[in-house]
Amino acid sequence: MASRVVIVGGGFGGLYAARALAKAPVRITLIDRHNYHLFRPMLYQVATGLLADDEIARALRTIFSANKNVDVLMGEVKGVDAARRFVQLDQFDVPYDYLILATGIRYNYFGHDDWRTVAPGLEALEEADEIRDKILLAFERAEKLAATGEATREAVCALMTFVLVGAGTVGVEMAGTLAEMSRITLRNDFRHIDPSEAQILLYEAADRILPPYPASLAAKAQRHLETLGVKIFTKTRVTEVDEQGIVADGHRVLAGTVLWGAGVLASPAGQWLGAKVDRSGKIIVNSDLSVPGHPEIFAIGDTAHVVAPARNLLGMKNKKPMTMPGVAQPAIQEGEYVARLIRRRIADKPAPPPFSYKDKGDLAIVGRAYALADLRFVRFAGFLAWVVWAAVHIYFLIGFTNRFLVMVRWGFAFLTKRRQALIFPGQLEKRDDGGASTSSA
Ligand SMILES: Cc1cc2nc3c(=O)[nH]c(=O)nc-3n(C[C@H](O)[C@H](O)[C@H](O)COP(=O)(O)OP(=O)(O)OC[C@H]3O[C@@H](n4cnc5c(N)ncnc54)[C@H](O)[C@@H]3O)c2cc1C
């Protein structure tokens, strides 16, 4: 009987592992709580109305429709029985011979999980839609309040204040895009408010923004954000989040919208196995990405703490082994590596050498037509970096139709400075309970 490979998580790691195994003599069960693969790097484009949900996501079932040995199951994995080799799905158990855990991360609210409802973080499509609605509703509420002619300037200003907690890549990208949206896209769309007066406040507890980037690039990003009107507060800790806004270093800041991007925690996969984990809960894996004590279980992507030798795009080797960052490339390369290892084990061939990483560098977008590129052997910021960012991200979108549509949509948005996905389903009044408390603040 063909070996049974169960993959939990249809993100970058799980998807690329399944693709690389799809032609092997194995039976694959790919399990995800969503029925789609999501291109997370473009999630904030959905959250700010540039792209629609289906332009950055594709049904897993469609991706594997031609691979009869791939069984896609939509469900929530609750645990793993490693002794009996079963994955515990919400309603039944799924047996495996090999298990690949690629369950990603969630945001860390540092013990304040109740903040999650007030200050969502950009994780999946649900949150992107929720955030887009929050942003649009904030402007709609401000317009309605200003139209009464009785509102105080402070109340309208509070509704048009957007707080971003955490100045990592997601916070910086959101701040830049929000600035573009309020200063350019929505500029002429309201009659009683001026969206370009929206305040965008970015808070970071560390002493600078973009900690994973070289200081010189982070400084350029900061200057660019400031020219877009974003106010940046470094070395400032947010200690309270509620419907009225935040408290930062003891000061109350009234804000209609608070968004979270401050820190991440790995999924509970490490707890399922009782495995050794690092501070953020990532499973500390062996050099072949297997979980210590379980040669048939692998953890990859954001679920795993991987330290491996690395080479840059020019083939130059790093002096020291590198801890894999929480981005898509390690997840993709680890997924493909584990697939190769399983294929060789099944064919009774010697194991491949330990995992090593091809470090293609980092890219981040900071508003319209400006990005950062750290390709390790060269670093630059500005329009050229934005062109590289756009080309790479569109290239990696799954599926030709998506790529084509996104290129058209993006080109149109760039030329016309408009966004196409600026509607929210539902009615303002039905969602207005939060607005009442904010507006009276
Ligand atoms: C807003 C945002 C922007 C980003 N921008 C970039 C970028 O520009 N460039 C870059 O390289 N990286 C970026 N990243 C990081 C990148 O997306 C991740 O590093 C990458 O997705 C990790 O891949 P993964 O396979 O480990 O996990 P994921 O892609 O997160 O996939 C995990 C999957 O597991 C599923 N899952 C989790 N738990 C369970 C469970 N219990 N049962 C069933 N299914 C489960 C989830 O639904 C999800 O589909 C960004 C991330 C975010 C959130």
Image: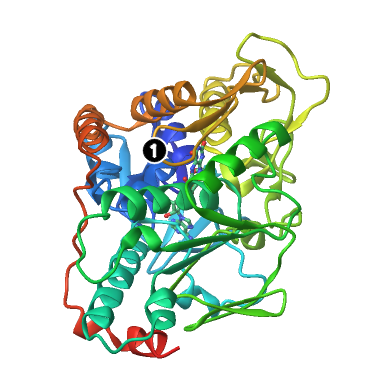
**Figure check: 109 above or below 317:** below
Camera-side residue: 392 or 277?
A: 392
Q: Locate residue 248 relative to residue 151 in the image: left or right.
A: right
> Is there any visible trace of residue 299 in the rendered image?
no
Position of residue 363 relative to residue 190, above or below, is above
In this image, 271 relative to 193: left or right?
right
Categorize mark 1 by other alpha carbons within 10 Å: few (<14), some (14-19), many (20+): some
Label 1: element kind:
loop
The percent position of residue 129, horizontal first and vertical second, equals: 31, 61
What colour scheme has been applied to the protein in the rendered image? rainbow
Pointer 1: what residue? 368
Is residue 380 something that shows in the picture?
yes
The C terminus: image quadrant: bottom left
Image-based side of 79 in relation to 68, left or right: right
Q: How many marks?
A: 1
Percent x, y for residue 278? 76, 53
| Of the pair 337 and 202, the residue shown nearer to us | 202
Q: State whether residue 441 is above or below residue 415.
A: below
> Which residue sits at x=55%, y=48%?
226
Q: Quadrant of the N terminus?
A: top left
Residue situated in front as seen by the camera: 301 or 200: 200
Front position in the image: 420 or 117: 420
| Residue located at (19% from left, 67% from top) | 191
Mark 1: which amino acid? Arg
